[in-house]
Image: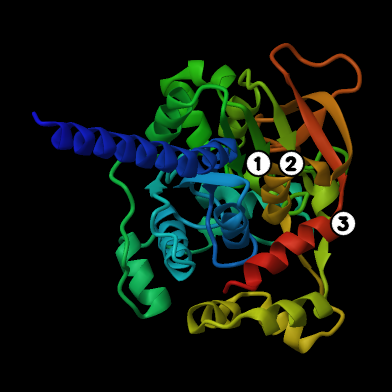
Amino acid sequence: MNMKMKKLTSLCGCLLLSMCMGVGAMTAPLSAEAAAREKVILDADMVDLFDDGIAMMMLAESPKMDLKGVTIVIGNTWVETGTASAIRQLEGIGRTDIPVYMGVNETVRKDRFANMKEEKRIYGRGHDSHLGAAGYPQPASWQAEYRKNYNDEPVMNPQKEHAADFIIDTIKKHPGEVTIVAIGSGANLAAALDKAPEIAPLAKRVVYMAGAFFCEGNVMPTSEFNVWIDPETAKKAYRAPWKEQIFLPLDVCSKELMSHNDFKDLESRIKSDRFKAMWESHYATPMFRKDPSFKNYIWDVLAAAVAIDPSVILESETLPIDVDDQYGYGYGQTMGFRGAAPEGAQNAKIVYAVDRAKIWKMVEDVFNKL
């Protein structure tokens, strides 16, 4: 090789090395930023917009969160309906990269839905007559629900893997890093724990919207819907040895309401036809339009907000907790023990007050993108 060729080769080598170092310098901050984002799984009985849908979009759009997937469980809706809803909303915000997993579509008691109305007659009920999925027939498929509810064809599909398996795989792949935001029944978590009980101490934390610890219930005098629909799976989930459990129960959710002014403000922010249609078909919309004094709960939004920014918690108490899974007056009641707790009860942080201004800013940020 002559001298000119040696110099040219040396120059090319320096340029290549410089380019590689430059690329590394440019990509390093991005990698660090990605690594700093909180890995999260949303386990939900999904509905359009308030409240599960907004919770999902808060997690999907937050720069602090890495939403690894959305797992659908029975509760407010059948899994088919919840899957269609999750997919429709993720499509609407351009996040088809977030996978959706179909999960448990039944309760432990096989006659649970058939007996709900009779249970309310015998034991009384709370201020809410909600029956969730028990109030309508199970759909033929998630695709049929999508077409019926949105008069359109889906762009994305749910994953083939079962929700419980996805929860197990994700926690094992990222030990100590995954937060679960559980805003439906306990069925998917219970199914995951049945298959792999070792995942509980490997998760970072679980944030629930569930329970009524020191206040009245909603669907029953002592019980909150997410627990009452399937108390046996709730008990299994809450008694698992998670590193940390945080509850946003009715004790705080009953205080945080959406007013008529809030409703009008959020409505004015929606730009897309897709979400305008969801807003119009939401059960609360005609109530707000008819009665200026009407207010509505935002339940699951609080759990998403706490996962994104735990500093929104203003008042809480850590106690051993448990669930009454014995059929009777207290079926589905959650209890916090300030005295001696039953064997097997795990500690949990029960939230009593939150920073509404911070939470509402998160909600507004979502609506600004709809």
Determine the image quadrant of residue 340.
Answer: top right
- Label 1, on which residue? 227
Q: Position of residue 23 (x, y in %)?
A: 41, 42
Of circles 3 and 2, the one toward us is: 3
- Label 3, on which residue? 255
Q: Quadrant of the C terminus?
A: bottom right
Q: CA distance from mark 1 to mark 2?
A: 6 Å
Q: Are marks 3 and 1 in contact (CB under 8 Å)?
A: no
Q: Residue at x 51, y 51 (%)?
A: 114
For label 3, the SS is: loop
Q: Are marks 1 and 2 in contact (CB under 8 Å)?
A: yes
At label 3, the amino acid type is: Lys
Q: Earlier in the sequence, mark 3 or mark 2?
A: 2
Q: Residues within 10 Å of mark 3 (few under 14, many from 20)?
A: some
- Label 2, on which residue? 211
At label 1, the amino acid type is: Val
Q: Return the residue found at the far bottom.
A: 290
**From the viewer's perspective, is 187 left or right of 265?**
left
For label 1, the SS is: helix
Of circles 3 and 1, the one toward us is: 3
**From the viewer's perspective, is 180 left or right of 223?**
left
Q: CA distance from mark 3 to mark 2?
A: 14 Å
Determine the image quadrant of residue 313.
Answer: top right
Q: Position of residue 112 (x, y in %)?
A: 53, 44
Q: Are marks 3 and 2 in contact (CB under 8 Å)?
A: no
Q: Residue at x 55, y 67 (%)?
A: 48
Determine the image quadrant of residue 5.
Answer: top left
